Structures are given as structure tokens and as C-alpha cells.
Amino acid sequence: MARYIAPVQGKVSQLIDVIVLLILSIGALYLPLWMHMAGAAKTPGVVENPTWESLGQNAVQAGQYEALGYTPATAADLITARFDYSFSYLNLIVMVVVIVGYFVMMLKFSETEYREVIAEKFGEK
């Protein structure tokens, strides 16, 4: 049996592959933020004239915030921020469609490539 020699991919094709993967990676990381499904969904609590005591901080905690350059007014949003646990069925459906679509696409591409490799290695039936 002849030794298998894989086809060589050109430099331009490699560059296109890298760009597409970079776009997909950034898109996968940014999409949940854009849809407000991740850390961007924090909502700060409202505190009028904040002091360390009204924010629930003791002297040691207040000292650490001050060492980092915070004042009660600037630290209020950071300390009182809570996650927004609201739920959207539309966002869930969109994410499920994207994930299932990606899975189906990968199965189709894998099947095509698998058949090409088998045909190249063993010939057509």
C-alpha cells in the first residue's frame, strides 16, 4: 500500500483560515455580552450620599478601598452591583439555534472531509 501524503495548503488559504477562526472566536466571546447574557448584565444599586457605613463596609474594608484610590462615591457602584437574573426565552432560543446549527455544520463538514480522505487513501468504490 502506498504511503499517504496529505495535500499541501497554500499560504493564502492558511491566512484566510486564521482570519475566519479569529472572527469566530471573537464573535463567540462577544455575542453573549452583546445579548446581555454575561457579565455585562450587572445592575448597580442606588445609594444616596454613600458612606462606608451605608455601603456595609467596616474600617478594614474601607481602608483597602481607599488604598486602591476609591472613595465611597466612586466605590458605590462597584459594591452595590448585583447580577440581573432576568431570563429571556428569545435569547435562549437564539443560542440553542446557533449551537445546534454549528454542530450540524461541523457534522456535515466532517463527513465530507472524512469521505475525501477515505477516497484519497483507498480509492472510490
Image (spheres, rainbow, N blue to C red):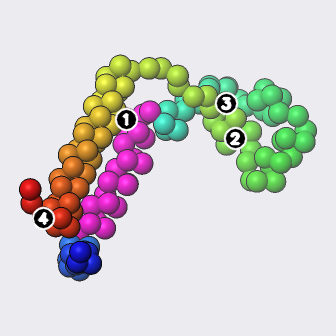
Examine the rendering and report whether any part of residue 73 can be seen: no
- Residue at the spot 44% in from the left edge and 20% down from the top edge: 87
- Quadrant of the image for the C terminus? bottom left
Query: Which disc number belongs to residue 80?
Result: 3
| Cβ–Cβ under 8 Å for marks 1 and 4 | no
Kindly identify which residue carries mark 4: 123
- Residue at the spot 20% in from the left edge and 67% down from the top edge: 121
Instruction: Give, as a single range, the part of the protein colored magenta.
Output: 16-37
Kindly identify which residue carries mark 1: 35
| Marks 4/3: CA–CA distance | 66 Å
| Cβ–Cβ under 8 Å for marks 4 and 2 | no
Q: Pick the residue in front: 50 or 86.
A: 86
Q: Amino acid at mark 4?
A: Gly
Kindly identify which residue carries mark 2: 75
Place residue 116 in its image quadrant: bottom left
| Disc 4 packing (10 Å; few <14; some 14–19; many ≥20) | few
